Image (spheres, grey):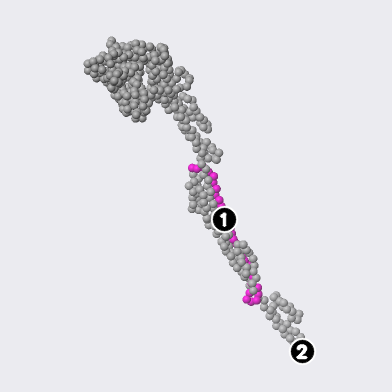
Amino acid sequence: EIMVGTTTFNEANPMGMVTLDAANGCDSVVTVNLVFKDNATGTEDYDGCKGDGYEIMVGTTTFNEANPIGSVTLDAANGCDSVVTVNLVFKDNATGTEDYDGCKGDGYEIMVGTTTFNEANPMGSVTLDAANGCDSVVTVNLVFKDNATGTEDYDGCKGDGYEIMVGTTTFNEANPMGSVTLDAANGCDSVVTVNLVFNDIPNAPIVSNTNYCVGENTPLIATGTNLLWYATENGGVGNPNAPIPNTSSDGTEMYWVSQTVNGCESSRAKITVTIISCDCNGDVNELEVTGILGQILAGEYTANVRVYSSEKVVENANVIFKAGSTVNLYPGFEVPKNSTFHAVIEACEPSSSLDDNPASERQGNQQATQFKVASESIQLKVSPNPFRDIATIEFTLPQEEMVNVGLFDQAGRKIDEVISGEKLAKGFYQVSINSHQLYGGFFYVVLQTPKERQVQKVIIIKN
């Protein structure tokens, strides 16, 4: 401002004239004209998003996300100050999460933008455009926990009383199969599948009562699977090896045997063994007739139980084989023309039904055979015997019978089942046995019917 005379001139009174008394006595007129120019001003406004990298320099000052607001005074061209005001706004980027904790197979899914998240695509991030112009990032994390599963399997026998409770459901022989859903600790279902198998109890093995001669040492025979032998009708521990009856003296012994199929043991079948004195005027129980230089001389050859041979009768000889139970003529046995051979089986077994002529007579060439005193007995023959690879079992049924034929080892264990419980008509039959999977030694071919048992000892050669 300025004072002229008594008048003040300033921005409010910028112009005017003042008359003053001059020293020379004349008036002095002062004209005042004050000009107040505007100071220059400006603003820098910005509306962006965090992290977009925007910045501006005003004078020597840099404005950005770290220094978004302020004023800078600049020298204007008219000599006045120019003030620039800066206001940078950096808006937040919107973020969000979608978490889910569920169970496999529950069908949960969610769509974020155009992306579908579910059990097949459980995790990821999607960037969306927010209303404020900045990005909106949604992070998805779906968790599908396993459903717990379990099984309860049981393989038992009918009537064994086994049962199990799963949840509130009881499984037993009346309700052996099913599934139960339980609540697991992780919040998902726990499914337990139950499968109880109750196998049939098999029938008792096929057996028959039998007679043994004093001194005979053949194991007992039964037809069945996984046999167990007992000395008592109940209790005790079964033995898989067939027993050999005590035949030291006359008397009666009883044995019991069961079979086991699919882990289930049958009831026990009873075998009554009658031990009798087979006194056939022999000095030994079993006699092999070997002859001299391969030739059987004339005479009588006697044994309490069995007489057998695989050699040739000398010419013009009369030969008698006398046994209490069996006469076996093996391959190699021969009776030439003009010789006579008699096979005599004495009535040593009281249960046998005898015919009028207890002797069998053959002339000429003889093949291996077995002579029994009972006229209606089953005739059993195995040839060749001994054998290496294959032998033929021949037998004749006097009437229709239910037949079992098996090969047993010396311990009474069944090695091969040749015929299993077949009903065969009266007549002649042939079947083969193969030794390829067997070891060498003594075995027994056993033919069993409900009424009769025939046993033929065979020799397998492996060398």
Which residue has dot 1 on it? 94
User: Is 353 placed above or below 42 here?
Assistant: above
Nearest to the observer: residue 52 or residue 451 = 451
Amino acid type, residue under disc 2 in the picture: Asn
Amino acid beneath label 1:
Ala
Taking the image as shown, residue 194 lies to the left or right of residue 378, namely right
> In the rendered structure, which segment of residues is drawn in magenta?
76-105
* Residue lying at 62% horizontally and 76% vertically, measured from the top left: 77
Find residue 168 and report its horizontal and vertical position in percent: 52, 31
Precedes in sequence: disc 2 or disc 1: 2
Asked which secondary structure carries label 1, the reply is strand
The x and y percentages for residue 426 are 28, 19
Looking at the rendered structure, which numbered label has been put on residue 24?
2
Q: Nearer the viewer, residue 411 or 95?
A: 411
In the image, is residue 161 part of the stretch drawn in magenta? no
Given the current orientation, which residue lies at the most extreme bottom position? 24
Q: Residue 183 placed where, x, y %?
A: 54, 37
Image point 47% across, 25% down: which residue?
A: 160
Q: In this view, does 315 lie above or below 106?
A: above
Classify mark 2: helix, strand or loop. Answer: loop
The residue that appears at 54% across and 45% down in the rendered structure is: 101
